[in-house]
Image (cartoon, rainbow, N blue to C red):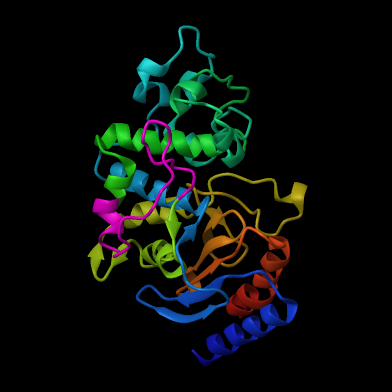
Amino acid sequence: MRKLEQIFANFIAYAEEQQLKIEGIAVADEKQVLLEHRFTPDLPRNIYSHTKSYMATAVGLAVSDGMLNLDDRLIDAFPEAVPDHPDEGLEKIRLKHLLTMSSGFGHPYLMGADRRAGVGACDYVTYMMSQKVVEEPGSRFEYSSADSILAGRMVEQAVGMNLGEYLYRRIFSVLDQGWPIWENDYQGHPVGCGGLYLPLKEMMKLGQLYLSGGKWKGEQLLDSVWVREASTKKIDTDKEATKDPWRCGYGYQFWMSPYPDSYRADGAYGQISTVLPKQRLVVGIQCPETGDFEQVKMALHKELLLPLTAG
C-alpha cells in the first residue's frame, strides 16, 4: 500500500506541475476506493464510449441467461428493418462482430457528431440496414458507434426491455449507481455507444465488478466466463499503424492495455477505467473535453500505470 500511495502521490505532483487537464483520478480494489484526488468538483459527467463496456455487460447478462447468443444474426433480430434488396453481406453480421467492431460496414457510422447532426433519423436500425457491407464481417477492426448501438438494440429485442431498465435492474441498482442520465435515440432507446453520465467513483464500479470476476459484495452479478471473454483480445487494432501503445487489441467493447492481462473501458477525452488484474486494482480517470488528452495519456502511462505494474 505504501508503494501505491507513493506512486499515486508522484503522479499527482507531476500532473500539477505539468498542468494536465484532469478532473479526477482514483485507484480502487474490488471492494473500495483506496485513493482519490480531485482537481475539480466531483460531478456526474458524460463518460462517452466508456458506456460501451456497460452495454457489453448487458450483452453478457443476456447471453448468460440464454436469451442471446454471440452467433445471433443482426437481420434475425430486426427482420422488419431489412430492406427489399439488402446488401448480400448483411446476413453475415453476427452479434460477436458488432461487439468486436468488425461488422464489415467499414466506416465509423453514427459517431457523436453524426448523431448531433441527425444522421440516421429517426431509426438507427433501419438506417444501418440500408448501408453497404464492404468487408467480410469479423475480418477487420473499424471503430464505429453504430456497431455498439446495434448490439444494444439486440439486447433489448432479446430481453423485451429497454436497455436502461435492464441494466438498472441487474447492475445500476445493485451497484448503488442510481438511475443515470443516458442519451436516448429518437425512439427512446438508450444508445449503446455512449452518453451515460456518471461521476468518477460510480463510473469505475464496472471495472471493480470485472476485477472481482463478476461478484459484488459476495453476489455473483455477472458470469465469470463472460468477464474473461469480454476482457481478452478478440481482434487486432492496427497498433503499428498508429504507434499508440494503447492500441493493442480489442475484446467485447473493452480495449486491451499494454500491462499484464490488463484492459480498459475507454471514453473520449479521458473517461477511463483500467483494470489491472495482477495488481488487483482499477485505475479510474476523468478529464474535460478541453486540453491535450494525448499528454494526459502518456503521463498516465509513464508516470502511473507502468510504475504500478513494474516488477
Is 181 magenta? The answer is yes
Rendering coords of residue 204 (x, y %): 44, 65
Q: Which span of residues is magenta-colored?
A: 168-195
Number of marks in picture? 0
Q: Is residue 134 above or below residue 218?
A: above
Residue 106 position by quadrant: top right
Residue projecting furthest to the top: 84
Choose between 54 and 18: the one closer to the eye.
Answer: 18
Residue at x-position 36% and y-position 67% = 212
Is 255 magenta? The answer is no
Residue at x-position 52% and y-position 41% = 100
Q: Is residue 130 above or below residue 95?
A: above
Image quarter hosting the C terminus:
bottom right
Choose between 192 and 115: the one closer to the eye.
Answer: 115
Residue 219 position by quadrant: bottom left
Does the magenta stretch mainly form a helix, a strand or a loop?
loop
Rendering coords of residue 116 (x, y %): 56, 37
Rendering coords of residue 104 (x, y %): 58, 28
Q: Is residue 148 above or below residue 171?
A: above
Residue 235 left/right relative to 155: right
Rendering coords of residue 288 (x, y %): 61, 62
Q: Inspect this view and state whether residue 141 appears.
A: no
Q: Inspect this view and state whether residue 83 appears.
A: yes
Residue at x-position 57% and y-position 41% = 112
